[in-house]
Amino acid sequence: MSTLKYFAIIIVFISFAGCNNDKKLPIYGQREAKITKDGIDTVYQTIPAFAFLNQDSVMITQNVFKDKIYIADFFFTSCSTICPVMHRNLKTVFDEYKENPDVMFLSHTIDFKYDKPSVLKKYAQKLGVDGKKWQFVWGSKEAIYTIAEKSYLTVVEEDSTARDGYIHQGWLVLIDKEKKMRGAYDGTKTEQVEQLKKDVAILLKEYKK
Amino acid sequence: MRKYLIGSIFLIIIYSCQSSQEIEYAKYMSNGKDIYIANCQNCHGEKGEGLGELAPPLTDTTFLKTNKNDLACIIKNGVNKEMIINGKKYDGKMPGFNFADIDIAQLMVYITNSFGNKQGMYTYAQVAKDLNSCKP
């Protein structure tokens, strides 16, 4: 009888552990079916190649994010509405994964007129995150606005009637090592940012074999 | 007996006067808090802790005391000059907020009585006075 009891407990434990291991994040964006030799495969939307100037005036591409998962967002340095909250919250994620080289951060400025690399550099230093782990990038209006809307599914716009001249959404977008979009979190809401922290851990587990 | 009666009426008057002042203060505090959450908290933080070196904290009680007469102007017109807060330098730009005098008064009462500050009441009449002498 007692061995049976132990057995039952062990089975319950195993099934719980199984559940945890199975947890995976969804894959967002468009998908299409592709016919291959082995049958039908799903092709997911990925972040296309890009080249932007970072806060050190270095042209960076996706090579910087090779074998990394990263969190992307869109902001501008003179934004006095949602950006400070987004980056206050994102900095707590940064601090939590400070020691993990597999996690990076990518903030795009949408203020192509004013936020030149030197301005981004100062901003990064003042936020207290100046380093390779958190990249702040500048690109042409067309390049940034296109990648925001088409790839990261974030709305950004110039709008002279808005308080600081731009309107944009405060999404923090989680990208995996295959450049697929695995989550989007409202950076102005602390509970969603807490979820992001948990999801980063889940995503990292997928790569632990 | 009559003496006691007069004395107690006197006391009641004083007590109710005080409590109406307290009610006014409480009203300022709670309205001020709403204004703070809607307009200031994103940069200055829920606990007035600021944001890195981008936005200064509101916990420098000495600064807030010695510059009290400038606070209304700072809120109304914004600020674009260097400041030393808690011994650290801040040179970021703060936008102006075109609030009514009463809103500025309520906001100031909230800020100067939170985050470790304890400066008491501040009326909207004082706001009008302070705004008249804003430095360029």
Image: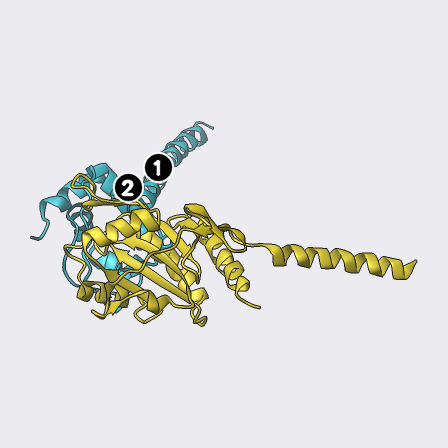
Badge 2 sits on which subunit?
B
Dot label at residue B106 = 2
User: What shade does chain A have?
Assistant: yellow
Which chain is in cyan here? B
Looking at the rendered image, the quarter that the C terminus of chain A falls into is bottom right
Q: Amino acid at mark 1?
A: Lys
Distance between mark 2 and mark 1 Cα atoms: 8 Å
Residue A35, percent from left and from top = 48, 50
Q: Is residue B86 above or below residue A197?
A: below
Residue A100, percent from left and from top = 45, 70
Q: Which of the 4 quarters of the picture holds residue A117?
A: bottom left
* Residue at figure coordinates x 20%, y 41% from the top left: A162
Residue B39, percent from left and from top = 28, 45
Badge 1 sits on which subunit?
B
Look at mark 1 in the image and give the residue it sits on.
B27
A178 and A115: which is toward the camera: A178
**Which mark is first along the chain, 1 or 2?**
1
Residue A18, percent from left and from top = 67, 57
